[in-house]
Amino acid sequence: MRGKLGIILLIVFFISPLSAQELTGTLQQIKKSGQIKIGYRESEPPMSFLDKEGNPTGYSIDICKGIVTEVENKIGMDVKVEYVPVTADGRFKALGDNKIDILCGSTTKTLSRSELVDFTQLTFVTGASLMTLKDNKALDSAGFDGTKIGVVKATTTAVALEKLIRETSTNAEVVLFNSAEESIEALRQKKIDAFSSDQIVLIGLALKEQDPMNFVIKPDVYSFEPFALAVRRNDADFRLVADRVISELYRSGRILEIYDKWIGKFTRKRLPIFDAMVKINATPE
């Protein structure tokens, strides 16, 4: 009898709410607080930006909304979503300081950044390009020589631009800005000849302006920019939740709905590299 009782108690011990015991890191923190904090950039359309009502929106935000739903399923409760604006140079520190739980924007995945944060599966691919005013022919006539090119500091584009200028021995001045909005304003006032950013971001920025046809975006790119969402380092359980959502979006093809919503209606034709990214990251369950 005692033997049977011991077995029953042992079974009860192992089948007791393991879900609560298994929650670790960010998932545990979200369950305790009842909220998830999403970091985003306010002016990086079409990936993340504020709509006319001042609400965070965009391609990456839509992906993160799916992740929030999966988090709720995982922890067994509804959570409040708090959107936290971050800057280019402060976004990774915000993760480390627990000011945000996930970074949803236009963040390029790199190995050096992986020393600070962990990344999910890729969410987009693009490359750095240049935006000029339609009536500014400076880059057409003399290339980069003698021009001023703006770029947001603490971005991979800034690094790639400096490298391009150095390797081509070009006499151009790189002007650093705190945000894309500052850069666009400087471009309008002709304080700079061009603004450099990820090509897809440039497209989004131009379309957000009241006079999009006043801007010209160069068709060529000079870097490879694989986007991903960022989470805190060594938090495998939370990252797995995000990866599951991204993989399911790819396997089901629903990522194409998000693409068409934010990008497809402007570019019309998807780049082959995007379709390749979807196939490669459609990890089986």
Image (cartoon, rainbow, N blue to C red):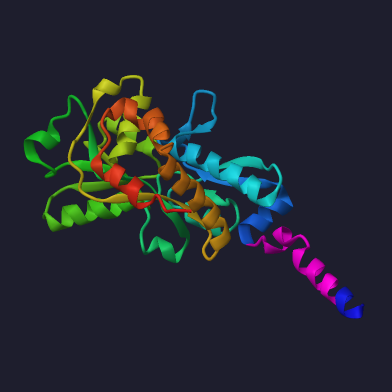
Q: Is residue 228 visible?
A: yes
Q: Is residue 90 visible?
A: no
Left or right of residue 197, residue 144 in this image = left
Left or right of residue 169, residue 279 in this image = right
Image position, residue 187 (x, y; %) = 28, 33
Image position, residue 22 (x, y; %) = 67, 63
| Nearer to me, 4 or 281 | 4
Give the vertical position of 133 relative to 64 (above or below): above
Image position, residue 7 (x, y; %) = 82, 74
Secondary structure character of the magenta stretch overall: helix
Quarter of the image where one finds residue 81? top right
Name the residue at the left extreme.
Answer: 141
Give the vertical position of 84 relative to 189 (above or below): below
Q: Which residues are magenta?
A: 6-24
For the point 30% across and 32% down, which residue is it? Answer: 203
For the point 26% across and 51% down, which residue is it? Answer: 224
Is-magenta flag for residue 227? no
Is-magenta flag for residue 21? yes
Quarter of the image where one finds residue 84? top right
Left or right of residue 155, residue 79 in this image = right
For the point 40% across and 38% down, which residue is it? Answer: 253
For the point 85% across and 71% down, which residue is it? Answer: 9
